[in-house]
Amino acid sequence: MDNISLFAKIKEDFGLPKKNDPALHSSFELLFNYPGVWAIVNYRIANKLYNSGFKFLSKFISGISQFLTNIDIHPSADIGRRVFIDHGFGVVIGETTIIEDDVLIYQGVTLGGVSLTHGKRHPTVKSNTVIGAGAKVLGNITIGEHVKVGANSVVINDVPCGSTAVGIPARVIKTSSECEDNEMPLDHNNLPDISGKMITYLIKRVAILEHAIKEHDAIDVSKEDKELDDIYANFIDAMKEED
């Protein structure tokens, strides 16, 4: 991480919404509509004080910032340059978290620990990574450069650079041979439905096995088929009512 002044980092922070958010129409909106920016700016001040030995004052500033922005960043966390928290409500960044440069974090993300031991117990997030809304990245793990973490994923293991991780627990579903950046930070609509594909596979596999058994043993299961069709129809009707 570059060694630049606190003022220079804060100036970069205030310039990020213009780069990352097409909803920004005027600089005046920064005052009221970007809690993520203010949370990072407050963190930088608190972090400077924390590292200078003023731990009580730094935690006091962090507490006020949490109250105003609904974003909880421990003043001891190590956050690099041009880190943007979009919308931001509900974001939690733990004490020993390390976030490198040019990271994009959406609302509801937790960078948390899984133990009460002292020492490094929170994630390390490398540069140019995007963490989708509601994702939980837990423990002393490393998220490599140019990684995409899908919304609401729970990441508990290292993710190699240039990868996409989705699911609970998160699985690496795509890894680039070269850790290169992509034009779009995170295509939420292009993340595959792993559970859906697995269920579809299991349904087709069971159907093939049933057909083979019927053909081989000449078993009549028409009554059971009718019962299953009724159960499925009731399920579809219930889903439509919820919509």
Image (cartoon, helix red, strand yellow):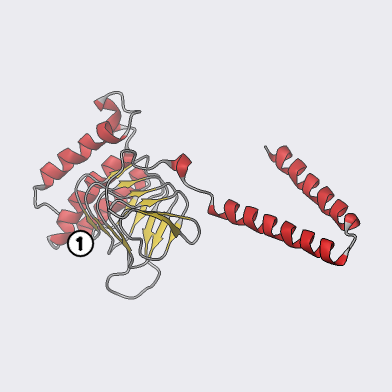
Q: Which residue corresponds to the image point at 89% horizontal and 55% vertical from the top-left?
A: 222
- Taking 21 as reference, is 106 above or below it? below
Q: What count of labels does the image hold? A: 1
Residue 60, quarter of picture: bottom left
Give the amino acid at mark 1.
Lys
Q: Which residue corresponds to the image point at 77% horizontal and 62% vertical from the top-left?
A: 212
Instruction: Return the residue at label 1.
Output: 55
Question: Between residues 227 and 206, which one lies in front from this camera angle?
Answer: 206
Residue 97, quarter of picture: bottom left
**How far across and how far down the image is residue 125, in percent?**
29, 57
Q: Which residue corresponds to the image point at 27% horizontal and 41% vertical from the top-left?
A: 38
Asked if residue 72 lies left or right of residue 236, the reply is left
Asked if residue 72 lies left or right of residue 213, the reply is left
Q: Quadrant of the N terminus?
A: bottom left
**How far across and how far down the image is residue 162, in percent?**
32, 53
Asked if residue 5 lies left or right of residue 112, the reply is left
**How far across and how far down the image is residue 107, in percent?**
40, 45
